[in-house]
Amino acid sequence: MRGYLIFGGTSEARQLVEELASRQVPVTVSVATQYGGTLLPKEAVVLTQRMNQEEMEALMRQERFLCVVDATHPYACQVTQNIQGACEATNTPYLRLARPSSDWQGNMLYKETHQAAVSLLEQIPGKVLLTTGSKDLGLYTELRDFQERLFPRILPVESSLKKCLELGFPVSHIIAMQGPFSKEMNLALLRQIGANILVTKESGAAGGFQEKLEAAQEAGAKLLVIGRPAEGREGLDFSQIIERLQLEYQLPTPKPCPLRFPLFVDLRGKRVLVVGGGGVAFRRIRKLTEFGCQITVIAPELSEKLDEKAHWEAREWRSGDCAGYELVLAATNDHTVNRMVGLEAKSLGIPVNVCDAPEACDFYFPAIARKGPVVAGITACGVNHRLAAESAQRVRDALENLSL
């Protein structure tokens, strides 16, 4: 069958690609950077170059996709316009996957545009943690003392760093890090900088908006929010996209997966190995630390500060590292490394979870809901992470009303 074309390096795009790949349908993904391509499942065809409208049209005419899904960032208005134009020119069906807006309240400043935000910053003294990305950084250099006041947080890629330097930002003010960022990480940066203002886009839960809001509140900093453009507010949510693809564009229904028994085990004192130091690894480490196990992390770098209860070995994983552990989690962004970790653990009879290969897992790492002695672990066959997360949140909400 003909396949689907997805535009975007967002978390929503990755979830959609994972879902389509799990249904074993051809999927092509267009992302702007090489790094974005490394986060996608191996089953997808990944294109890692920026395309103008003419190049998009050429690709669509050549491949004759069943449908195009625009899952780009809600602020990437020009890209969305190019995709829409290319679909119209080639008579290719177009769907927009929209990121849900944040349900936010509180003492925040709000401006519709970056230009308006710069004008406001002129009136408010103090240092600024700027988390709007590298695309619009040039506008913020209009601030009279931007080199002293602004601390831009950007992706750790050459193009972003080069742009910061060309615009005149001091090296000491550039924060090159890959998210997702926890509340604690945002809070630590605000305190390290001494910032009393955090500037962010209204990026929704997937963009870490809530973690920024909570960090700013705890630090006593003002949160300045850049409004979402109209193009970024329109579209369908994840479940609606899947429904449309199934009803109108030949997406097969998911194959039933074998149910797994929810076995609750005592991890106190158990030696657990986590291979990887990125966002996925840290989300799992944070949960594991609640259950009393002894965690060792093997990773060349960490995306955030490790809990003092865990031990970090700053290096690449090597053959033989799984020996002596009672549980292993492979959670790097390298599919080959994850597979090798999984195979070694299995050969040693050690239960293993491989974050990007459900079929290679002895156990799925569940979404956890907990209150007091009540612990619920939820999974959706290890592939539908969104469904598992939403289900877990509903259980958490129910537990809040439970009298223990």
Image (cartoon, helix red, strand yellow):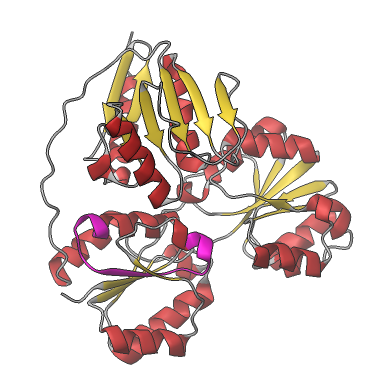
x, y percent for residue 325: 40, 22
In the displayed structure, 48 sits above or below 370; it is: below
Q: Taking the image as drawn, is residue 181 in sight?
A: yes
- Residue depicted at 34% across the width and 47% down the height: 356
Nearer-the-camera pick, 352 or 214: 352
In the displayed structure, 121 sits above or below 27; it is: above
The reply, left or right, for residue 147 in relation to residue 391 is: right
In the rendered image, the quadrant that contains the C terminus is: top left
The reply, left or right, for residue 370 in relation to residue 172 is: left
Q: Quadrant of residue 358?
A: top left
In the rendered image, the quadrant that contains the N terminus is: bottom left
- Residue depicted at 67% across the width and 35% down the height: 187
In the displayed structure, 362 sits above or below 63; it is: above
Residue closest to the far front: 320
- Residue depicted at 23% across the width and 44% down the height: 359
Q: Taking the image as drawn, is residue 394 in sight?
A: no
- Residue depicted at 34% across the width and 25% down the height: 369
The reply, left or right, for residue 78 in relation to residue 90 is: right
Provide the residue span drawn in magenta. Answer: 20-36
The reply, left or right, for residue 188 in relation to residue 208 is: right
Q: Quadrant of residue 355?
A: top left
Q: How many dots with numbers?
A: 0
Nearer-the-camera pick, 274 or 289: 274
x, y percent for residue 274: 45, 32
x, y percent for residue 169: 82, 60
Q: Quadrant of residue 107?
A: top right
Does the segment drawn in magenta span residue 233? no
